[in-house]
């Protein structure tokens, strides 16, 4: 496994600053974006009582935010470890 160390820099973007109370450690992304993977495991065969109702709304909100940030968003629902 290769770990990537991120260098944190102060942001000068006022739209970013208003989102956070502490902008000292806000990561400045490069202009080129990659893929964002969202895995929404909400149904569990062996534990139906753990069904995560409402998680689809979380996925929609996260996906919209990532698309706004120009990521190519891929979502999967109820993946097994083998997949």
Image: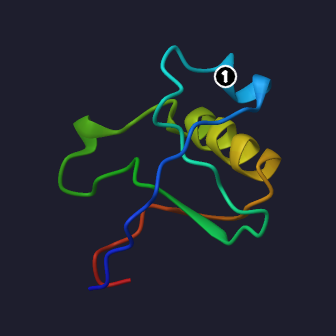
Mark 1 residue element: helix
Which residue does the image show at 46% across and 57% down from the upper left? 7
Looking at the image, is 59 positioned above or below residue 75?
Answer: above
Residue 82 vs 18, above or below: the answer is below
**Residue denoted by label 1:** 17
Which quarter of the image is occupied by the C terminus?
bottom left
**Is 47 displayed left or right of 83 in the figure?**
left
**Residue sitting at 65 percent across and 36 percent down?**
11
Residue 33 rendering spot, x and y as whole percentages: 72, 67
Classify mark 1: residues with Cα within 10 Å, few (<14), some (14-19) or many (20+): some
In the image, what residue occupies the spot 76% across and 32% down? 13
From the viewer's perspective, is 80 left or right of 57?
left
Query: Would you identify the image quadrant in which residue 14 lies?
Result: top right
> Percent x, y for residue 63?
68, 48
Where does residue 29 sit, x and y in percent of width and height?
Answer: 65, 55
| Quadrant position of residue 48 | top left
Q: At 33% across and 73% down in the image, what residue appears? A: 80
């Amino acid at each position: 496994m290769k770990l990537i160390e991120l260098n944190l820099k102060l942001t000068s973007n006022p739209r970013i600053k208003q989102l956070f109370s502490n902008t000292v450690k806000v990561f400045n992304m490069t202009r080129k974006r990659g893929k964002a993977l969202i895995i929404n495991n909400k149904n569990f065969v062996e534990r139906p009582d753990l069904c995560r109702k409402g998680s689809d709304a979380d996925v929609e909100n996260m996906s919209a935010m990532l698309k706004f940030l120009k990521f190519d968003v891929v979502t999967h629902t109820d993946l097994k470890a083998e997949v």
